Amino acid sequence: MPPASTGASTLIVAASTQSSPAPFTADRLEPGRPGYRRMSFALFAAGVATFALLYSTQALLPAVSASFGATAGQASWTVSAATGALALCVLPMSALSERFGRRQMMTASLVVAVTVGLFVPFAPSLGWLIALRAVQGAALAGLPASAMAYLAEEVRPKALVAAIGLFVAGNSIGGMSGRILTGWVAQAWGWRAALGAVGLLAVACAVVFHFMIPRAKHFSPGSLNPKALARTVGGHLADPLLRRLYAIGALFMTVFGAVYTVIGYRLVEAPFSLPQGVVGSIFLVYLVGTVSSAAAGRLVARLGRRGALYLAVSTTAAGLLLSLADQLAAVLLGLVLITAGFFAGHAVASSSVSRTATTGRAQASALYQSAYYLGSSAGGTLGAVAFHAGGWAGTVALGLAAVLGVVSITLYGTRAARAERMRPAGLVSVQN
């Protein structure tokens, strides 16, 4: 299971499904061979840049609100626009990478996203900031759509997991360090300087990527076939179990997006009144996801997929309720439980997608990523609106409603599986 980061475990699923590994050849990359270390550094840097940019404004939302006189709901669109655009563009970007090449798509995505990132700190209004962030999210969609296919084609199978791990580690470190960096820089020099610092970090990462990434040797261009893509996507969306998994991923991310978009507003206000730098450091809690993601496989082995989901939603719900307390220790413990429950549930749902889809697995994983990031976008905006209307209790109520949705879907799946087992032999059910 992957390290903790928003999207990390989804990317691991995509890695195993994005592209069928090329036939074995002696010149494919592996540890100890020329080019493997360069490739590892390059994709690690790309991962850092991707998630540092994608969530760069999340820890800064209170400062953005104060600067533009905006509500939490309005400012939250600086995050939701980026994640929403990424969600909408993952599938078409994956198709383009099949035609134009993985390395070319990753390079173009980084160049556009980093260039936009240098303009983001100078946005004259909230509307411009949101628009720039949407363009940035759309550009970043080309990286997860291409990086995993590149690895599957260029790295020997026995070294593939380690190579993927380095890229996902870059995602995790980029997502966490970007939030912490912006928090402390904003405390000293303001939110615009903080976004500028993330932009410069991304520039450095893009330069490392450009000079370190080896040329692709095993990529074979394919043709763009919209009708075939549409048939594959339609087939996945017609599968009841895949639909349930997509909904579970979106609902889990709705909770997570709502909590981490709004938590900064709560912690800078009374009774906590924490400085911006400390609020940014709260995102160190993400490291808890490393443990819970790694434990998800063992939980599934012991409890089954649905049992693991029930445990994940129970942990998340307990964390939401605990976070209602006005003691900082209780809030932090609540965040730990929410984070642990989210990453465990996300790992279970995302890994189930590749096991469920027997054909078109790349598109199945891309659809999960789309649902996942749409959940992030919806959660950030709706969580902020709920906070504006009812304070932290409103955000918690939204999270509990999403948790109830996961429970309902899982219960339905349990009943469908039971009904399937009771069917006479020879009858095929479409429910599970």
Image (tube, rainbow, N blue to C red):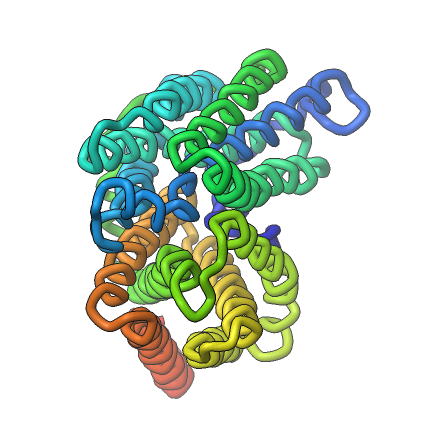
- Closer to us: 203 or 128: 128
- Closer to us: 376 or 242: 376
The spot of residue 279 in percent (x, y) is 49, 54
Quarter occupied by residue 411: bottom left
Quarter occupied by residue 297: bottom right
The spot of residue 64 in percent (x, y) is 31, 43
Question: What residue is drawn where x is 45% and y is 18%?
Answer: 107
Residue 44's place in the image compared with 230, above or below, is above
Question: What residue is drawn where x is 42% and y is 83%?
Answer: 421
- Closer to us: 381 or 280: 280
Whether residue 361 sits left or right of residue 66 in the image: it is right
Is residue 269 in view from this perspective?
Answer: yes
The spot of residue 222 in percent (x, y) is 37, 22
Circle count: 0
Which image quadrant: the N terminus?
Answer: bottom right
Which image quadrant: the C terminus?
Answer: bottom left
